[in-house]
């Protein structure tokens, strides 16, 4: 492959696309040349951001087909809503099979699918198109995670034994867009939306450097879900108002809290544990990511709200609500942590650097759709465990056809 720069197009023009575009300031040899979205206004906003930040002279396209047919576009970044996954990849496959366009690769934001059937279909269509594939799981690229793993394995594990327990949590006060709150559109609640991050980050931490992810074998999953805050009438009313009456958490809620315990075995039959917690009912400064790793004589801790920058505003300082200090910011006064570069701290910059470098080199990224499918299987096992109130032993053939009750619009803990 002789290409020296990668021209990319974004499918979806919303919040996560803008996050990726901002991160590309720190990535070489890539140009954002296109955006297409169900909303032309959001596509224009993201294209404008690409131009303003100097990462590419992005054009707005009417469709995936139009963008994929442009010879300047070499790869696609899929950042569109969960409920459009299958149709998105069917159109990408059509672009390739019809000869309308030639592409090197495609990346996809989490989740790969709302369930195992959808995730398998995405992988199947991508293989049929002969495209390189990258699963956009930013937390495994976070600098604190990758550097922490490097140190722990090189010093602690090398002298006293491998780590055996990883904990990961992601918590904030709730998603930006109304569709995220609807189980049937999103594929679930907070478990599907955010535990995907925690499960994969923890698996990455426990995987010995240089070994493939499948060197860890999942043995069982035990999980619990609840709706602690947003089914309360006054909060359900807020969701209803924000969605123009479409979201009804009194009748069709999704879980706003979830936890899981996943048991693995390594190649030496050592027992390893992953403990995850996620919530949409966390009230603090803003988004909190925490990761912990434990071994025989060592431990590692990450908390993104333990930032190196804090500011304080007295009650006499007034201003509009925003997210200029931290994602999902909940206050504008008092002592506040500031995440000075969220795209770097959360791993987006390193993630996109890896995807771009892999595509230009003609190599499949280290984090790819096989990982996305495995994460989906683990999440479905977690939903199954929570619904059946028992530990799910793996492998379980029923997981591949399982659709959670919340994704069917049939889950209501209050009856």
Image (cartoon, rainbow, N blue to C red):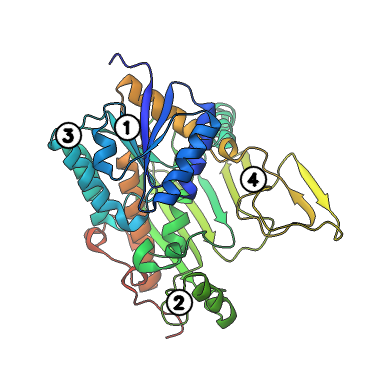
Q: How crowded is mark 1: few (under 14 residues within 10 Å), some or many (20 or more)?
A: many
Measured Cα–Cα span from mark 3 to mark 1:
14 Å
Q: Position of residue 310 (x, y in %)?
A: 77, 45
Dot 3 corresponds to which residue? 100
- Camera-near label (2 vs 4) is 2
Determine whether the residue tagged by mark 1 lies in a helix, strand or loop: strand
Taking depth in this image into account, of 390 and 50 the one nearest to the observer is 50
Residue at x-position 54% and y-position 79%: 237
Judged left or right of residue 156, residue 396 is left
Q: Nearer the viewer, mark 4 or mark 1?
A: 1
In the picture as drawn, the residue positioned furthest to the bottom comes out as 415
Q: How far apart are labels 2 and 3 at the CA level? A: 41 Å
Foreground tag (3 vs 4): 3
Q: Depth check: give the residue in front, 215 or 108.
A: 108
Real-space CA distance between mark 1 and mark 2, rounded to the nearest whole angstrom: 38 Å
Upstream in the sequence, badge 2 or badge 3? 3
Query: Badge 1 is on which residue?
Result: 75
Give the SS element for disc 3.
Answer: loop
Q: Earlier in the sequence, mark 3 or mark 1?
A: 1
Q: Is residue 277 or residue 289 the one in the foreground?
A: 289
**Residue 267 on image: x %, y %:** 35, 38
Residue 282, above or below 23? below
Q: Name the residue under label 4.
A: 304
* N-terminal-most mark, 1 or 2: 1
**Tags 1 and 2 in contact by the CB under 8 Å rule?**
no
Q: Nearer the viewer, residue 377 or 159?
A: 377
Q: Which of marks 2 and 4 is nearer the N terminus?
A: 2
The quadrant of the rendering that contains the C terminus is bottom left
The residue under label 2 is 245
Could you tell me which secondary element the residue under label 2 belongs to?
loop
Residue pictured at 30% horizontal, 48% vertical: 373
């Amino acid at each position: 492959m002789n290409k020296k720069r990668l021209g990319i197009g974004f499918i979806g023009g919303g919040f996560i696309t803008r996050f990726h575009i901002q991160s590309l300031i720190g990535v070489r040899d890539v140009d954002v040349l296109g955006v297409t979205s169900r909303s032309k206004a959001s596509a224009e906003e993201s294209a404008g951001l690409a131009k303003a930040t100097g990462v590419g002279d992005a054009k707005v396209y009417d469709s995936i087909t139009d963008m994929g047919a442009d010879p300047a576009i070499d790869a696609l970044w899929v950042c569109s809503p969960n409920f459009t996954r299958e149709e998105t990849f069917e159109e990408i496959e059509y672009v390739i099979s019809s000869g309308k366009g030639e592409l090197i690769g495609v990346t996809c934001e989490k989740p790969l699918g709302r369930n195992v059937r959808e995730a398998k279909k995405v992988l199947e269509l991508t293989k049929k198109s002969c495209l390189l594939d990258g699963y956009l799981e930013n937390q495994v690229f976070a600098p604190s995670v990758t550097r922490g793993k490097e140190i722990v394995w090189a010093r602690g594990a090398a002298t006293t034994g491998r780590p055996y327990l990883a904990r990961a949590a992601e918590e904030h006060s709730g998603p930006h867009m109304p569709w995220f709150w609807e189980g049937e559109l999103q594929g679930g609640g907070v478990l599907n939306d955010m535990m995907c991050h925690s499960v994969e980050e923890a698996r990455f931490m426990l995987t010995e450097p240089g070994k493939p992810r499948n060197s860890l074998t999942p043995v069982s999953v035990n999980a619990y879900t609840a709706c602690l805050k947003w089914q309360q009438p006054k909060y359900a009313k807020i969701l209803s108002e924000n969605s123009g009456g479409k979201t009804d958490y009194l009748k069709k809620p999704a879980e706003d809290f979830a936890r899981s315990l996943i048991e693995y075995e390594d190649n030496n039959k050592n027992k390893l544990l992953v403990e995850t917690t996620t919530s949409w009912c966390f009230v603090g400064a803003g988004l909190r990511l925490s990761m912990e790793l434990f071994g025989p004589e060592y431990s590692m801790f990450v908390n993104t709200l333990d930032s190196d920058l804090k500011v304080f505003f007295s009650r006499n300082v007034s201003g509009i609500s925003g997210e200029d200090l931290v994602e999902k910011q909940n206050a504008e006064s008092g002592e506040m942590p500031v995440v000075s570069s969220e795209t770097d701290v959360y791993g987006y910059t390193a993630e996109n650097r890896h995807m771009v470098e892999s595509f230009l080199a003609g190599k499949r990224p280290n984090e790819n759709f096989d990982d996305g499918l495995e994460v989906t299987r683990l999440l479905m096992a977690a939903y199954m465990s929570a619904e059946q109130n028992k530990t799910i032993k793996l492998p379980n053939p029923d997981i591949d056809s399982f659709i959670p009750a919340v994704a069917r619009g049939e889950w209501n803990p209050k009856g």
